Amino acid sequence: MTRHELKPPIRRPLVDAPETGHNRWHPDLPPALVVEPGDEIVIDCRDGLDGQITPATLDADLLAVDLDRGHPLSGPIAVRGAEPGDVLKVEILAVETDDFGSTAIFPGFGLLGDLFEEPFLVTWGLHDGTATSGRLEGVRIPADPFVGVIGVAPSPARMEQFRAREAAVVEAGGVALPPDANGAVPPGEPYASTALRTIPPRETGGNLDVPQARAGSTVFLPVDVAGALLSLGDVHFAQGDGEVCGTAIEAHGRVTIRVDVLPAAKLGHRPQTPAFESVEPAWKGGRRHFVTTGLPIRPDGSNADLDTTLAARNALLAMIDWLGAERGLSREQAYVLCSVAVDLRISEIVDIPNPVVSALCPLDIFHATPPRRTG
């Protein structure tokens, strides 16, 4: 095992140092680092808004924030031996944040964007495991840091599929963000005008905003291209499920991971969307869960617009598949078990057009031997 450090200058905005990362998804980006399965990597990550919010930022300054610069990512990291059809296993060993964070209301953005027409900013001091702010007197938010964006590059075919289905959402009167060269990093063509925006999460991961991507957890990502081309960023000090105003406690941070490749030929089950084996922090009970995720994608591959019911169905179907493949349950048994033990959570509801619903199955309900199939 080798330990690597991928450390761009996080105090310097990505837009001013485009050689240190990217903020769009594209399969042709050259890797910033090449590693072997089993290697550990320490990664510095910029905050989700590329450092545009500082302790001196005022409410009115939010109107000048360039949202096209969102999600500056560290990477891509190529993992030798990863091939399309494999699963990339990413163990999150540590997530640390700096001592400053921010949460912003941007007019028109968020679940209640139509009701909040003025910018509003809360800046936080992050010390001794809690976040406090003079704008929320008497409140202490306990630390639960996690990686907001983690994903692998889509193949050219999938990139076109994603682009087309999101364009169809717009044509149907919904909201999605097409490829746009404004603020794109790297800025060169044809990348800048064709690469996918990072706002919506997709089957290859991305802006999932799933708090289960915390230290002690493992993320499973379906590989689309040789080397996987893993990227991550957008560290959150804490976030409520849903991220309803559109931002969490956003912070610069450092993430330590270990990567491995699960070959397609040896897999009994390959998740079609990101999955997790996660542990809750002690103050939340410390339980371990297997977590599946669902997006609002119809069976025909088309994209519904912010449809949490469809996302919940897909998360549940993914969990039923996992219970069958890994625990030997029939679909009926798995469906019943989901009804009595699995929690559905809206992990995020603001990343247009794709909310994420997660299904959490506690692992302590199982005996050492998987249940027998009875049907």
Image: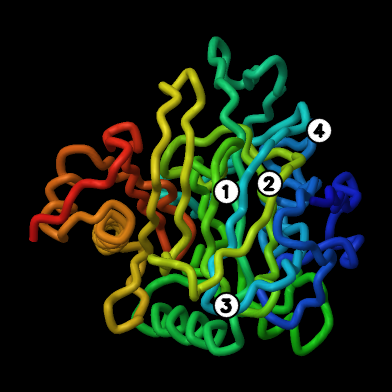
Real-space CA distance between mark 2 and mark 1, rounded to the nearest whole angstrom = 7 Å
Query: Residue at image x 51%, y 63%?
Result: 201
Q: Amino acid at mark 1?
A: Phe
Real-space CA distance between mark 3 and mark 2, rounded to the nearest whole angstrom = 37 Å
Q: Which mark is residue 224?
A: 3
Query: Which element carries disc 1, helix, strand or loop?
Result: loop
Q: Amino acid at mark 4?
A: Ala
Q: Residues within 10 Å of mark 4 (few under 14, many from 20)?
A: few
Residue 104 lies left or right of residue 333; in this view the side is right
Q: Are marks 4 and 3 in contact (CB under 8 Å)?
A: no
Answer with mark 1 or mark 4, whichever residue precedes in sequence: 4
| 277 is higher (above) or lower (below) than 269 | above
Q: Position of residue 104 (x, y in %)?
A: 60, 40
Q: Are marks 3 and 2 in contact (CB under 8 Å)?
A: no
Nearest to the eye among marks 4 and 3: give it.
Answer: 3
Query: Which element carries disc 3, helix, strand or loop?
Result: loop
Answer with mark 2 or mark 4, whichever residue precedes in sequence: 4
Answer with mark 2 or mark 1, whichever residue precedes in sequence: 2
Splitting the image into 4 quarters, where does residue 54 fall? top right
Real-space CA distance between mark 4 and mark 3, rounded to the nearest whole angstrom = 42 Å
Mark 2 highlights which residue?
Answer: 62
Real-space CA distance between mark 1 and mark 3, rounded to the nearest whole angstrom = 34 Å
Answer with mark 1 or mark 3, whichever residue precedes in sequence: 1
Q: Which mark is residue 260?
A: none
Mark 1 highlights which residue?
Answer: 106
Real-space CA distance between mark 2 and mark 4, rounded to the nearest whole angstrom = 12 Å
Q: Amino acid at mark 2?
A: Leu
Q: Residues within 10 Å of mark 1 (few under 14, many from 20)?
A: many
Query: Residue at image x 76%, y 53%?
Result: 39
Query: Residue at image x 57%, y 39%?
Result: 214
